[in-house]
Image: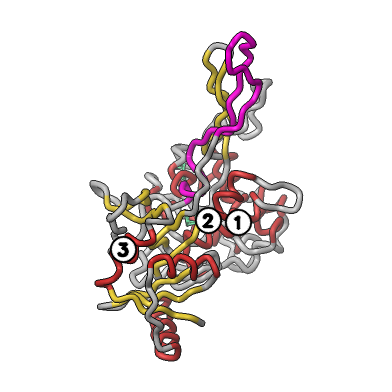
């Protein structure tokens, strides 16, 4: 294990140096909330934050992106039927991402980078990105990461894990990409390995002890899909939903998109834009038929996808890292922890629906 000790007084200078060869992104406070944005040279991320209102997913998977341009105008000088657009895949680093958001990229990767199907935009953006995580010493009351396959010091998906104390950051280097970024910043003071390991382990235990929300997921895989689909609790779970889509927009593990052509005369561009299974138009067929025509269908789809279909398909746990954003953002207080509990206990002695 290699750990570098970064004196906080050398932090800003290092970032400035790294900015010579990386585009840097980090959490910045807007009027009310922190969100991730690209940092201008000399700007430091504000690491005194709990978590960002939106996840960092748009850095790798933009909310809206051009796939290619097309033209059917044969009289145009630069006539082309289809033309790829240039995209910036130069190396970039996300400074201060929380471990849950980094793990979310690992979960989404199971969908976008498979043996049968490879999403070129996602893969190139992932390859270009170095994730410098910030261990989470003050989890929110709605965080349940430790029972969602993650944790406040979780390392999966990260290239570097930063652990903060009063005067320093300990930077635990996890990958070659991480080492390259640390070198580019010129941070080169090796920490005492044993003392650093003890400090990080103590921090991890203290942070995990602050997590007060949990989910049980142990029965999800074994429960019959059709039985869960037909469970009576979906009516109650979906009753107050207004299908605003906020939960999917804020979620770091939601990946659905729509493809649309922005046409002007005989030319235009093909775009892909985030979409949401919570919107009524999401599954409308060309015939006008909608197989998910009610909000019960749509709410059930969201939870069945995250907590059952994904579990069955990829065998890597639930499609959720327990960041709690959907809980904090839902205007009608629909809580994935409660829904997970209903699903996981369905048909068991603990099942309140069966009573
Ligand atoms: S945020 Fe809440 S109300 Fe809005 S779509 Fe999601 S579950 Fe429904
Ligand atoms: S489903 Fe909710 S708690 Fe889970 S990763 Fe998405 S926003 Fe976070």
* Residue under pointer 1: 307
* Of marks 2 and 3, the one in the foreground: 3
* Label 2 neighbour load within 10 Å: few <14, some 14-19, many 20+: some
Is 234 within the magenta? Answer: no
Task: Name the residue carrying label 3.
Answer: 47
Badge number at residue 339: 2
Circle nearer the N terminus (1, 3): 3
State the extent of the magenta-drawn residues as a range. 57-85
Whether disc 1's CB lies below 8 Å from ligand 2 is answered no
The residue shown at (26%, 78%) is 167
- Quick one: label 1 or label 2, which is nearer the N terminus? 1
Q: Counting other residues with Cα less than 10 Å from the Cα at mark 1, is it few (<14), some (14-19), or many (20 or more)? A: many
In-front residue for pair 116/313: 116
For the point 45% across and 88% down, the residue is 193
Looking at marks 2 and 3 on the same chain, the residue that comes earlier in the sequence is marked by 3
Q: Is residue 200 left or right of residue 227?
A: left
Residue 1 drawn above or below residue 77: below
Nearest to viewer (mark 1 / mark 3) = 3
- Find residue 157 and report its horizontal and vertical position in percent: 54, 64
- Is 179 in front, or is 113? 179
């Amino acid at each position: 294990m290699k750990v570098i000790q970064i004196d906080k007084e050398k932090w800003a200078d290092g970032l400035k140096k790294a900015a010579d060869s990386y585009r840097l992104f980090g959490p910045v406070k807007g009027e009310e909330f922190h969100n991730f944005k690209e940092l201008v040279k000399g700007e430091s991320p504000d690491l005194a934050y709990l978590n960002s209102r939106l996840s960092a997913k748009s850095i790798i998977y933009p909310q809206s992106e051009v796939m290619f341009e097309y033209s059917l105008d044969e009289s145009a000088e630069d006539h082309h039927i289809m033309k790829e657009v240039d995209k910036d895949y130069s190396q970039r680093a996300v400074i201060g991402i929380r471990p849950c958001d980094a793990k979310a990229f690992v979960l989404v990767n199971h969908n976008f980078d498979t043996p049968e199907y490879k999403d070129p935009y996602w893969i190139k953006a992932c390859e270009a990105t170095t994730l410098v995580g910030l261990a989470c010493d003050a989890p929110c009351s709605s965080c349940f990461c430790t029972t969602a396959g993650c944790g406040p010091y979780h390392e999966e998906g990260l290239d570097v894990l930063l652990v903060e104390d009063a005067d320093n950051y300990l930077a635990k280097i996890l990958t070659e990409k991480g080492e390259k970024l640390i070198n580019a910043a010129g941070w080169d003071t090796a920490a005492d390995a044993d003392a650093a390991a003890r400090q990080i382990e103590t921090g991890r235990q203290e942070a995990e002890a602050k997590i007060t929300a949990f989910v049980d997921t142990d029965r999800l895989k074994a429960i019959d899909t059709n039985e869960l689909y037909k469970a009576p609790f979906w009516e109650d779970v979906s009753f107050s939903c207004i299908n605003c889509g906020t939960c999917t927009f804020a979620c770091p593990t939601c990946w659905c998109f729509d493809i649309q052509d922005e046409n002007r005369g005989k030319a235009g561009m093909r775009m892909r834009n985030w979409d949401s299974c919570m919107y009524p138009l999401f599954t409308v067929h060309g015939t006008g038929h909608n197989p998910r025509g009610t909000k019960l269908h749509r709410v059930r789809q969201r939870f069945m996808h995250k907590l059952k279909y994904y579990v069955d398909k990829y065998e890597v746990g639930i499609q959720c890292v327990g960041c709690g954003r959907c809980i904090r953002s839902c205007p009608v207080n629909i809580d994935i922890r409660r829904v997970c509990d209903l699903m996981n206990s369905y048909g068991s002695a603990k099942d309140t629906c069966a009573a």
